[in-house]
Image (cartoon, rainbow, N blue to C red):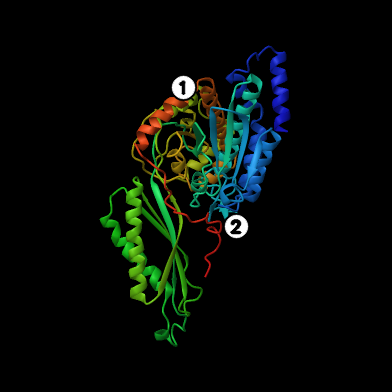
Amino acid sequence: MIKTIWSVFIVSCFAAGLVRAQPADDVVRGIDALAGEYAGIAQQIWDWAEVGYLETKSSELLQTTLTDAGFTVTAGVAGMPTAFVGSYGSGEPVIGILAEFDALPGISQDRSPERDVIEAKGAGHACGHHLFGTGSVAAAIAVKEWLSRTGTQGTIRLYGTPAEEGGAGKVYMVREGLFEDVDAMLHWHASDSNSASAGSSLANKSAKFRFRGISAHAAGAPERGRSALDGVESMNQMVNMLREHVPQETRIHYVITSGGAAPNVVPDFAEVYYYVRNPDPKNVVSIFERVVKAAEGAALGTDTQMEFEVIHGIFALLPNEILARKMHQNLERVGGVSYTEEERAFAETLQQSFDREVPPVSAAAEIQEFYVSEEGGGGSTDVGDVSWVVPTAGLRAATWVPGTPAHSWQAIASGGMTIGNKGMIVAAKTITLTAIDIFENPQIATEAHQEWERRVGPGFEYESLVGDRPPPLDYRKPANQ
């Protein structure tokens, strides 16, 4: 269907005298012509809300969309059933586009500006990856059409990357060497504003710590029991004391994923899931080692056994000013998101749920000023590892109502309606124009690579923070005793 609409659009442009060498503006108009089709795909993925490494239907839908548009798709790459690579064209430059599609567990919301939990739904797209994946596919197809119509040499490649939310799918693709021949990597993310600066993020390492004890009747024979939950709680207490003695940029989070089933049974199994973040991956490694020591001490003090499984480890984003400035120029060319009266009413109602001052809804139409930041803050992303092996740039598009934080029910609601769809199209157009700029002027990629070499430093060799472990395909499944 998408390929057919593209063909009809191009023929009509030729008939109207609009197309001679398929200029970029016509490609952008082609994305607008397909906006409804892409909105349907994104919202179908929103409905499914599949979590990391279990995004079977979402991945298949994006793969089918690419195949129907003329891409060659290789599925199940790097040991991950839902990972894939779609490719079109030949030769250099090779430009990659990243696509994500996993949801977050434990949060759901209907397409409403007021809190409305979908009780039967255990996950939701609170980080907008349904839009991310679809918008990136839209951009890849638009670039493919431009390459085909102009006869320009080069390769456009779409990377379907699962489990960004804690599963680090891209790390295993980097480790597999799937980005080694890529000249420039482009990506985007859902947000409450529009920006394309050269920023960084936090490096991150996570693990599940599993304690095993001895079950017993908590009242009748407590002396015979050894509580695995005591081990978890003792570990948490020690890590909370550790917070005073780590660099202030550090973030440590945990959630108890299993703590027993009944108060009168001493639990013989308990599990806690930890994240450790810092701008410097070396600091992350050293702080993580101290967290492990806390776990070992907790096991010793509670007479339990402890083992841990590293789930993911990711680098901070490596900025690339050359690519980022080009992305920013194209974002300014495309512009932000303008609301209809209906969308404005939705946004203003949703903003009433915040207990703080928020930007006006008109801020969705604005483009944030460009900046360069060498040290990251806020969240983490496995795009970081990609950026350390290939020059990388990304943008954020206003798919959420201004003032909306990521990982919130308000993000799910905004991303489930036309506001999210509009932001996705802004991102698709911006990535498309940036890719075309690089194809038309490969010197951009050359200069970006020179900057990348300067930033990684002489003698740099990538080594993932997860070691040689295989992808944790079951990390979103319930704690396993």
Closest to the observer, 191 or 386:
386
Badge 1 is on which residue? 443
Residue at the location (63% across, 45% down)? 75
Of all residues shown, which one is farthest toward the left? Answer: 245
Q: Residues under labels 2 and 1: Cα distance?
A: 53 Å
Which amino acid, by three-letter code, is at mark 2?
Glu
Which image quarter holds the N terminus?
top right
Q: Position of residue 428 (x, y in %)?
A: 56, 31
**Total numbered labels placed on residues in the image:** 2
Question: Looking at the image, is mark 2 or mark 1 earlier in the sequence?
Answer: 2
Of circles 2 and 1, which is in front?
1
Q: Where is residue 200 in the image (x, y as percent from the top left)?
A: 39, 39
Q: How crowded is mark 1: few (under 14 residues within 10 Å), some or many (20 or more)?
A: few
Tell me whether circle 2 and circle 1 mark residues in contact (CB < 8 Å): no
Name which quarter of the figure residue 449 lies in.
top left
Residue at the location (38% across, 30% down)? 451
Q: Is residue 259 above or below residue 143?
A: below
Q: Where is residue 197 in the image (x, y as percent from the top left)?
A: 41, 31
Q: Position of residue 64 (x, y in %)?
A: 69, 40
User: Would you say 425 lies left or right of 1 here?
Assistant: left
Residue at the location (54% across, 43% down)? 128
Badge 2 is on which residue? 119
